[in-house]
Image (spheres, helix red, strand yellow):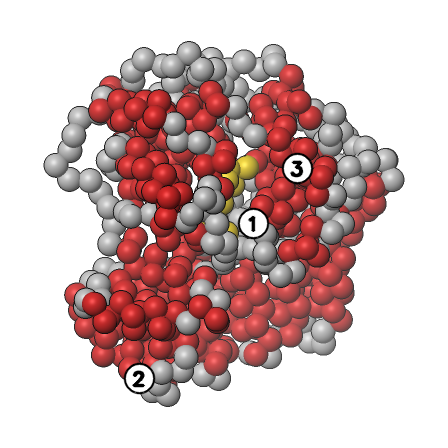
Amino acid sequence: MRRTLAACAGSLLTLSSSLSFAAAAPGPYGPYGPYGDQPAHSAPAQHPPQPDTAPPDPAAAAIGSPALSGSVPQTVTSDTGLFGTLPDLGGPAYAMITRSDEDQIGQMIVAQIRGAHLLLEDPEVDDYLQQLGMRLASQAHDEKQSFHYRCMNDDEINSFATFGGNVFMFTGLILRTRSEGELAAVMAHETGHVVQRHMARAVEAESHLSLASTAAMLAAVLIGVAGHGNPGSGEAMEGAMAMAQATAFQKSINFTRSEEIEADYVGIQLLAAAGFDPQEMANMFETLAQSEGLEGNEIPAILQNHPVTPERLAAARERAAQFPRLAHYGESEDYAFIKERIRVLAATPDQRIDQYYANLRVNRPLTPAERYGEALTQIRDGRGAIAVPTLHALQAEYPELIMLYTALGQAYASAGQEREARAQFAEAERLFPRNVPLTVHYAEMLIKDGQPDQAHALLLDLFNNVDPTPPQIQLTAQAASAAGDTGDAYYYMAQYNLANGELGLANQELELALATPQLSTVQRERFRAQLLQVRDWMREQQQARHGG
Ligand SMILES: [Zn+2]
């Protein structure tokens, strides 16, 4: 089913905190936007927000297995959590922040972080994190809550949960986990903050702020935290807000100690329900504590907000021990490979990641995942011919790992063996139809190979069946352009700009799309409808800016 894009309010993010409208109403496509899984931003309306009328379903709040029930710590006062407690909708936080408000703040924050180039947006990494996250989040059985797991390209040991179910996992933290269970444990903890709606409570103290100001401040905090020592992030901060103000705000929104305990508690339940060893939460605490020792006196960022006290560790061990031990826990083969992929993608040129693998080889043979990582560096450096035999062997050993098929196709292309590359991708696409990372890389190869028509067709099919990410929309525009479909190319660039909150640019692209000669009637109507919608949103934003 084809979906159109919702409006964006990204430029709101640069507004100062003097912005006076009280709250933003859901956009025309509902609070979750058209993509569900992707940021789609709704313009503020002039009318007051509609309260979330549907109360959480207490029946849906209980996790299926009886093993998951248990004594609830005193600190748990959740409204939509795992414990089936009834919502407290009378509190000021709930009066202020509705779920659709939360979604909009989350969307605005993501647009800003994306705009500051702090995300590692890679098809394989995104796909993996989202699937792993949903494996945990789905155990909360909270159908009204959306969850988005994203990778922050930053070496800090850190992670965040923020509004709209947006969880940011830092590359530095992912690379330091020792197992998929440990990674899942951090994600489960952050998911715990989301399902318990801790963000809504945290901004209670700041309830005089508008949604846009809240989003701007939170984005500034996250960008400031992630962008330390990151060139260009200073610019991103500029105009968002003053650092001192952001720091003060951050203090006010830090989760309380009892919320951290609650997130651990819920996280352990999610881990167990998703088939992970619930002891991984405590294991991860130990890993974090060790990384503190390893890196001198510097306390990992995550420990500053999440200090691992002996009490916290003991509580996590004790809670996990209440679940029956299983002979086998469901850890995927993907984890180790994705970790090496992140290591390669996150490495800066001066880090000489090829040398990293060469150094490992001196002492021991590389693991299969490390051989994959090394192959990726070879492909990237134009030495794909060396990677081909490695990837052939790995693909035979791990026939379920789609990323190996893709890498082999890319290795062939990098080695100048175009015919083999095409055959490899075509066969993989036949085995794993509509797999997003595979199809995206296949289309990239086809565009490079001078077959934009086929790339355009593949991407359109994907676009119409799976919610696209902004980089995917951009690639679709590129394919349309290369295929000579200029009108569609402008249209997709407009969609891309909308996804990033750039209403003005989207307006320009749509005008260009409409000015393209020889449009079909269908195209003209689609472009015009979108243009009218964008202009409506721009007007609303203008009015909101002037206090309308
Ligand atoms: Zn936490």
Q: Residues within 10 Å of mark 1 (few under 14, many from 20)?
A: many
Tell me the number on the disc at residue 247.
Answer: 3
Tell me the number on the disc at residue 376.
Answer: none
Which residue corresponds to the image point at 45% horizontal and 83% vertical from the top-left? 449
Tell me the number on the disc at residue 385.
Answer: 2
Decide if ligand 1 comes within 8 Å of the CB at mark 1: no
Q: Residue lying farthest bottom? A: 416
Residue sitting nearer the eye, 276 or 74: 74
Q: CA distance from mark 3 to mark 1?
A: 13 Å
Q: Residues within 10 Å of mark 3 (few under 14, many from 20)?
A: some
Q: Is residue 221 above or below residue 393?
A: above
Coordinates of residue 15 in the picture (x, y in percent): 78, 44
Among numbered discs 3 and 2, the one appearing first in the sequence: 3
Q: Is residue 94 above or below residue 233?
A: above
**Residues marked 3 and 2 touching at CB (< 8 Å):** no
Among numbered discs 3 and 1, the one appearing first in the sequence: 1
Question: Disc 2 marks which amino acid?
Answer: Ala
Coordinates of residue 158 in the picture (x, y in percent): 47, 44
Coordinates of residue 163 in the picture (x, y in percent): 57, 36
The residue identified by callout 1 is 226
Q: CA distance from mark 3 to mark 2?
A: 50 Å
Among numbered discs 2 and 1, the one appearing first in the sequence: 1
Please state the total of marks drawn on the protein image: 3
Q: Residue lying farthest left? A: 327
The reply to whether residue 219 is visible in this rendering is no
